[in-house]
Image: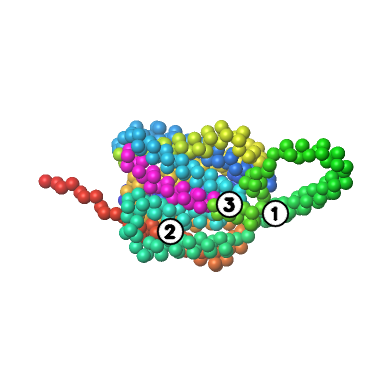
Amino acid sequence: MRGFSFLFFVALTILMWGIYGPVLHVGQEALGDGQRLSRWNPFICVGVAYFIIAVVYPIFMIPRETKGNWSPGGIFWSFFAGSIGAIGALGIILAFIFGGSPVYIMPLVFGFAPVINTIVTMLMSRTIREASTVFYLGVLIVAIGGAGVMVFKPKPPAKTAMLMSTQQEEEQATAATSSEKSETETKKPAADTSETSPAISDSPAKDPITETLNSKEPVSDKNFIWMIASIALTALCWGSYGPVLHKGQAKMGGSRLRPFLFVGLAYFVIAVALPLLLQSYLPPDPGTWNFPGIAWSLAAGAAGAIGALGIIYAFNFGGKPIYIMPLVFGGAPVINTLTSTIADQTYNQLEWPFYISLFLVIAGAVTVLTTAPRGKPKPQPETS
């Protein structure tokens, strides 16, 4: 049975990474103010969860490892892998804040991250010239499917639509108030205007990025580009995560948990320590700390960390990347879509073009992973 025991950990990773986005989105809503999603507080919770699972757990388990050693190079590359992983997690949070939904954001990430992963791997192993036509066809299929997912994505749920209506009403009221105030000020004598001008000039300039972050609109012309940029950031970071971590593992003698330990430490520094240290310089987070929001955000971080640990154990129990990663990146988007549409009650809005586009994303990602050049095998030592 050991020959197939790795499938349990593959299934565990598919489930954990599949629910990561929807659970994190719930945490952002719970920690928000009812109209805006929280951004830094969920990110901190994700970092805390990674610290518990990726630091505390390896500390107890590393002494039992029979393979691996400590090395400065391994520490550097593993910490770097964790850093870009944490930045990718921040990209997901920002994509939600800019109005995105887990139902299409996560499939796009899971579709393009394997492409980035494979390209970075080929660049690091200098096998980019060995890529076949089928490989590039897979990249094209992912791109076509990704575009289709964005075009045929379901409409925002009723709760989001209500917030949009509230946003429009508030903007109309604000515009009316500003108009009345402007008319009143024009009727004032010049002396009064000069007295108030210093107060106007001393007011701080509005930050357009902060205004966009505080916006409640789901996907508008104003924040669509920012949402796409956030998705691209996550795909780039999470796609590069695997090859960079693998280099850290190689420099630690093939150890699995030693590199994972420094991934957890990087998450703690990027997602916990820095936001807390820089909180006075960051835009204020809407909402307040509360138990449901903390619990959901911690659960999202735990799902991400457990999924990463599942990959490690799948390798330890005999699984090979050539079929483990296609299974993970093919199955996780399906779990994500089911979870998201059930939670948002948008499953009735999904039409066949969306499903076809989702299938293209998955099929393209699997094609890229399975047809990537593997490089020349290392020569085996001769035995006498």
Circle 3: residue type: Trp
Callout 2: SS: helix
Q: Earlier in the sequence, mark 2 or mark 1?
A: 1
What label does residue 164 carry, if any? 1
**Kind of element beneath mark 1:** helix
C-alpha gap between disc 2 and disc 3: 24 Å
Q: CA distance from mark 2 to mark 1?
A: 35 Å
Residue 280 is at least partly visible in this image: yes
Disc 2: CA contacts within 10 A as few (<14), some (14-19) or many (>=20): many
Which percent across, then down, holds residue 212? 64, 48
State the CA–CA distance, disc 3 to disc 1: 18 Å
**Percent x, y of residue 204:** 69, 39
Question: Which residue was labeled with disc 2?
Answer: 365
Front position among marks 2 and 3: 3
CA neighbours of label 1 inside 10 A, class few (<14), some (14 to 19), many (20+): some
- Looking at the image, is mark 2 or mark 3 earlier in the sequence? 3
The three-letter code of the residue at mark 1 reads Met
Residue 159 in the image: x percent, y percent? 67, 53
Residue at the spot 57% in from the left edge and 47% down from the top edge = 94
The magenta stretch is 230-252
**Most prominent secondary structure in the magenta stretch?**
helix
Left or right side of 19 for 327: left
Residue 161 pos. (x, y %):
68, 56
Identify the residue position indicated by label 3 in the image: 226
Q: Secondary structure at mark 3?
A: helix
Say whether marks 2 and 1 touch (CB < 8 Å): no
